[in-house]
Amino acid sequence: MVLKGKIYKGIGGFYYVHTPEGDYECRAKGIFRNRNEKPLVGDDAEIEPVQDSEKAHEGSVIRILPRKNQLIRPAVANVDQAVVIFALRHPDPNLNLLDRFLIHMEQREIPVVIFFNKVDLVQPGEDTAEEEETVPEDRDAWKKKKSRAKTIPEIHAEHPELIPEIYRQAGYPVLEISTRNEDSLPKIMEVLRGKTTVLSGPSGVGKSSLTNLIHPAANMETGELSKKIERGKNTTRHSEFFYIDDETYVLDTPGFTSLYVTDIEPERLMYYFPEFEDYRSACRFNTCVHIGEKDCAVKRAVEEGKIARERYESYVMLYQELKDQKRY
């Protein structure tokens, strides 16, 4: 007898498969090792129950059905969208790391929604600086004035409420949430309902707390920040799918602290920054890469506040990184 099902968890060489006949604990057949293939969480698979096994519902994965898509990090398959979660505080967000994740998803043509968690920690009245300062309506002019005296990370540390607008301006869907507040649940479910979603982000930003909010039965372990390095402790140690309701699945994944951008020619990096699109054609030179050239419309848009300086600086850093990879 052959059953079809979905791999919802993989730990230590065991794959847990949900089928119409119940859940099975499976090993992968040796044919996968011979082909240098590996089943992934999210795979639709065919399994063969083991006859006369001492354990109930034990089986073998014998075939992986064609994948719609596949991610390397996290190692999952067949997702409709990615939700990347960053905290506005504790830990402070690493925007270059977020940009790297967005590029990874763009390479694989997977839509992304950005959740900025812990908005309850940056509500008006919080003492975020030695001297409380009100942000004026003209935020771009204010940021430009501030940047003369302070670095961008220092500005963000004092005013993390500015960060979500950077990505809205770049064209990404953004949601500001608090996993401590159930009032966030309806707008979260509006994003998730009817889709298979992979949750990703650094450790300590609230991925497991989000899973517990939308699916209390998951009972995911949550952790505190490491006081020494101000980085989250990784409480999610494997990828696992959770069934929420009809056609709604959420995949919680281990946190990441670094991502490398590869397989992109430096001259093509600009196409992974959608906010550049409206300005590229106005550059003086057709070959402009928007770094050292004169009469560059993209750099002019940065100076005018039409493109966020944070995103542009991230672009320059990644461009140089790709150039260095190509050189060596």
Image (cartoon, rainbow, N blue to C red):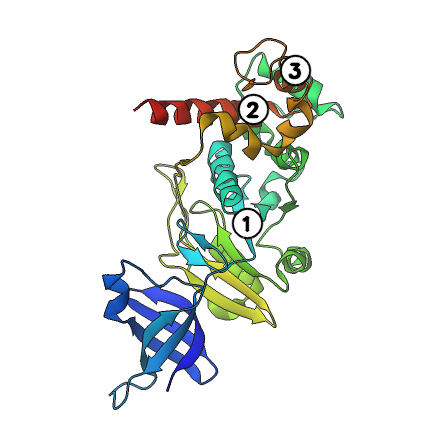
- Residue 220 shows up from this direction: no
Give me the C-alpha separation between circle 1 and circle 2: 23 Å
167 up-or-down from 112: above or below: above
> Foreground residue, 19 or 154?
19
172 up-or-down from 41: above or below: above
Which secondary structure, mark 1? loop
Q: Residues within 10 Å of mark 1 (few under 14, many from 20)?
A: some
Q: Residue at x 39, y 56 (%)?
A: 236
Residue behind mark 2:
312
| x then y, percent, for residue 135 | 70, 26
> N-terminal of the two: label 1 or label 3?
1
Give me the C-alpha separation between circle 1 and circle 3: 30 Å
- Residue 192 shows up from this direction: yes
Identity of the amino acid at label 2?
Answer: Tyr
Dot 1 and dot 3 residues touching (CB under 8 Å):
no
> N-terminal of the two: label 3 or label 2?
3
Q: Residue at x 60, y 69 (%)?
A: 247
Quarter holding residue 283: top right
Q: Residue at x 52, y 19 (%)?
A: 151
Q: Quadrant of the N terminus?
A: bottom left
Give the side of residue 198 with respect to residue 167, left or right: left
Dot 3 and dot 2 residues touching (CB under 8 Å):
no
| x then y, percent, for residue 95 | 51, 33
Residue 300, numbered circle: 3
Identity of the amino acid at label 1?
Answer: Ile
Q: Quadrant of the C terminus?
A: top left
- Work out which residue is located at the far bottom of the displayed protein and give it: 52
Identity of the amino acid at label 3?
Answer: Arg
Which label lies toward us, 1 or 2?
1
Give the side of residue 283 with respect to residue 66, left or right: right
- Work out which residue is located at the far front of the displayed protein and give it: 286
Q: Residue at x 32, y 61 (%)?
A: 38
